[in-house]
Image (tube, helix red, strand yellow):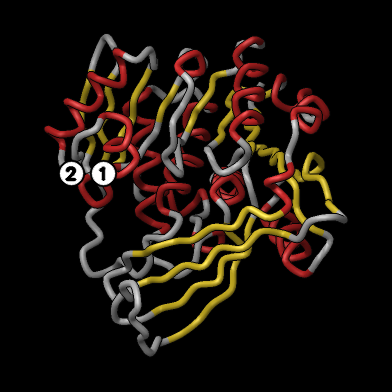
Amino acid sequence: MKNISILGIFVADLVFFGETIPITGETIIGEKFDIGAGGKGSNQAVAAAKAGAKTFFISRIGDDQFGTMAKKIYDEVGVDYSKVLISKEHSTGAAGILVNNKGQNAINVVPGAAAALTADDIDAASNVIIESSIFLTQLEAPKDVVYYALKIAKENNVATILNPAPASKIDENILTLIDYFTPNEIEASFYVNHKVENEEDAKKASKKLLQMGINNVIITLGDKGAYFANNEESFHINALNLEGKVVDTTGAGDAFNGGLAVALTEGKNIKDSITFANVTAGLSTTKIGTAKSMPLRSEIDNLL
């Protein structure tokens, strides 16, 4: 079994570029505007497919212009969307993304049709989950649906990755269903109640997360790389050196998770898998956009 199945949402990314990100009550004149394909699960599916894996995406989209955009990009990169349901009642989701001249961003996501996902939808897609090597999901879809899908994966010995974004409370009984927990600094801070800004902070946070019952913790630290820990070992891996080349960090975490899923599916060890994921994420920051910034396998291999 070499497939990857991913549960999540698709949204149309409406991206506004400017010198700064406005604070509350502030209006600024922007520099440019872009529309592209987004949503964490969708981005991760595109990243995994472009990195070489047979990838199934599970979601809902609307019968509208943004839904057509989703299907077009899946056709282009080879994501199997046979388990993406088309809703007549709900529109496709959208995300407003503000990007400053350092490539930093702030995002407001409206899930749209994907917010109507149900356990019945997961049952209808259970065959692709069960036949996968890796099941990857996040917290943008309805939480009860995410939990139900994780349970199906775990019961069928499918390795699971939970990218806990956006960060929100997770039921304790769900933590044992997670093989790989992949928060960024902000998300890790939420779960451990202290700031996570560097390797030492990540080390402390990982210990707390492991004590909660999670098997493997990978905290991504942006340009500081990633920190891994389980009950046997722990280590830090540096990010790519991309000084002067970063133009947009939106979707870098999704690139990391998609790349991680691919590497694990291919049987790489955890260090090599995180290195592969770091390269995938780093390359994605050198292009504007989210889904369209995900690197090809040839680009990744050139830097490994």
In the displayed structure, would residue 68 be above or below residue 267? Answer: below
Residue 58, image x and y in percent?
Answer: 71, 39
The image quadrant where one finds the C terminus is: top left
Q: Residue at x 25, y 60 (%)?
A: 242
Q: Nearer the viewer, residue 22 or 52?
A: 22
Which residue in the rendered view is the most extreme toward the front? 25
Q: Residue at x 36, y 47 (%)?
A: 279
Q: Nearer the viewer, residue 275 or 97?
A: 97
- Per the model, the C-alpha gap separating discs 2 and 1 is 7 Å
Residue 101, image x and y in percent?
Answer: 29, 76
Q: Nearer the viewer, residue 176 or 56?
A: 176
Which residue in the rendered view is the most extreme toward the bottom? 29
For mark 2, does the 10 Å Cα neighbourhood hold few (<14), some (14 to 19), or many (20 or more) residues? some
In the displayed structure, would residue 278 be above or below residue 95? Answer: above
Task: Verify CB contact (< 8 Å) between mark 2 and mark 1.
Answer: yes
Q: Nearer the viewer, mark 2 or mark 1?
A: 2
In the displayed structure, would residue 235 be above or below residue 91? Answer: above
Residue 88, image x and y in percent?
Answer: 87, 56
Residue highlighted by disc 1? 221
Q: Which mark is residue 136?
A: none
Q: Which amino acid type is marked by label 2?
A: Glu
Residue highlighted by disc 2? 197
Q: Is residue 58 left or right of residue 82?
A: left
Residue 11, image x and y in percent?
Answer: 63, 58
Helix, strand or loop at disc 2? loop
Q: Residue at x 56, y 44 (%)?
A: 140
Q: Is residue 88 left or right of residue 294?
A: right
Helix, strand or loop at disc 1? loop
Earlier-in-chain disc, 2 versus 1: 2
Q: Which amino acid type is marked by label 1?
A: Leu
